[in-house]
Image (spheres, rainbow, N blue to C red):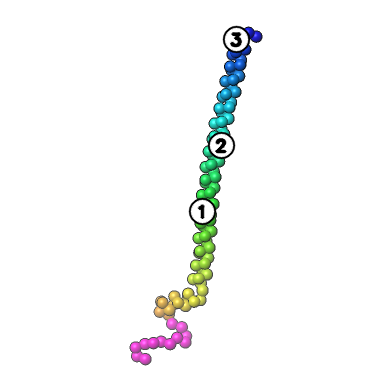
Amino acid sequence: MTQEKQKRLIISGVVGAVLLVLILLIVMVYQMIAIGVAQKRRQELDNAITEYKRLLQEGEDTVKEVSSLQWITRRARQLGYIFDGDKLLGIGE
């Protein structure tokens, strides 16, 4: 093998190795960006889950409050209903 062929072989090997390293670096950078985007999306979903759990708890508390007898009685009186045993205070009494 002549010295010229050896130089060409070495140069082509170096170029191939550099291209391989360059491609691997590009893939690594792409993967790191994809991981960052996925982590950000996961954090957004975790925040949404936390918010929905809070809203669900507030809704359950509201249901308990609204269904309580005291609230029902108060609302009925606001709407003008009267109950047995109520003393009616009127103008003619």
Circles 2 and 1, Cβ within 8 Å, touching? The answer is: no
Q: Tell me the distance, in whole angstroms, between the alpha carbons under discs 2 and 3.
A: 40 Å
Residue 34 picture location, percent across and down:
54, 39
Residue 14 magenta-highlighted: no
Residue 17 percent across, percent down from the top left: 60, 23
In this view, the mark in front (3 or 1): 3
Residue 86 in the image: above or below residue 69 = below
* Labels 3 and 1: the sequence-earlier one: 3
Mark 1 burial class by Cα count in 10 Å: few <14, some 14-19, many 20+: few
Amino acid type for the residue under numbered disc 1? Ala
Q: Which residues are magenta?
A: 82-93
Image coordinates for residue 6, horizontal then vertical, percent: 62, 12
- Dot 2: few (<14), some (14–19), or many (≥20) neighbours within 10 Å? few
Q: Quadrant of the C terminus?
A: bottom left
Q: Which mark is residue 4?
A: 3
Q: Which label's residue is closer to the chain start, 2 or 1?
A: 2
Q: Which residue in the protein does label 2 denote?
A: 31
Numbered disc 1: secondary structure:
helix
